[in-house]
Image (cartoon, rainbow, N blue to C red):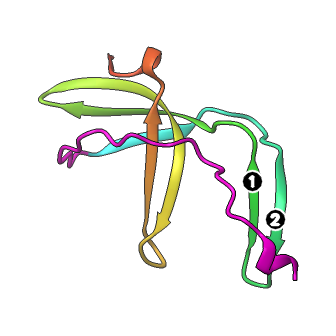
Amino acid sequence: GLAADAQPVQTQRPMTRSERTDFHVDIDFTGDFEVVRAKGIDLSDGGICFEVAENLPFQMQFEVGGEKYRSRAYLVWVKRLSEERCRLGFEFVPSESYRVV
């Protein structure tokens, strides 16, 4: 059938992973967008899945060593850790990141 003939499709660009550093600070962030158009994928009694064809920008600020920073970043992934907790991954917008407030 069709499913047996399907080939994997590369939908994401290859990612190079930068070195990670522990970073345990409070971060305030807000979505930096208006209405976003999305394309539905599937629907169930428990939820909905959809895709967006654009980056979702967020503004964030945090303090490190007594200095305040403001940054802009795109949401790139979300992982549900429990019913009440999620982990989010963002990619900094290079020209708009790490500006001292």
Q: Residue 96: which quarter of the image?
A: top left
The amino acid type, in three-letter code, at marker 2 is Ile
Left or right? Give the position of 11 relative to 4.
Answer: left
Image: 98 above or below 74: above
User: In which quadrant will I find the N terminus?
Assistant: bottom right
Q: Give the range drawn in magenta.
A: 1-25
Question: Which type of secondary structure does the marked residue at label 2 adopt?
Answer: strand
Instruction: Residue at 48% x, 33% y: name it.
Output: 73
Q: Is residue 21 magenta?
A: yes
Residue at 39 percent across and 40 percent down: it is: 16
The answer to whether marks 2 and 1 mark residues whose Cβ atoms lie closer than 8 Å is yes
Q: Residue furthest left?
A: 65
Q: In this view, does 99 lie above or below 88?
A: above
Q: Identity of the amino acid at label 1? A: Glu
The kind of secondary structure element at disc 1 is strand
**Against 64, is 11 above or below?**
below
Residue indicated by mark 1: 51
**Closest to the observer: 58 or 90?**
90
Residue depicted at x 18% and y 32%: 64
Name the residue beneath numbered marker 2. 41
Please, is residue 42 above or below residue 50 in the view? below
- Left or right relative to 55: residue 4: right
| Residue 77 x/y as whole percent | 52, 53
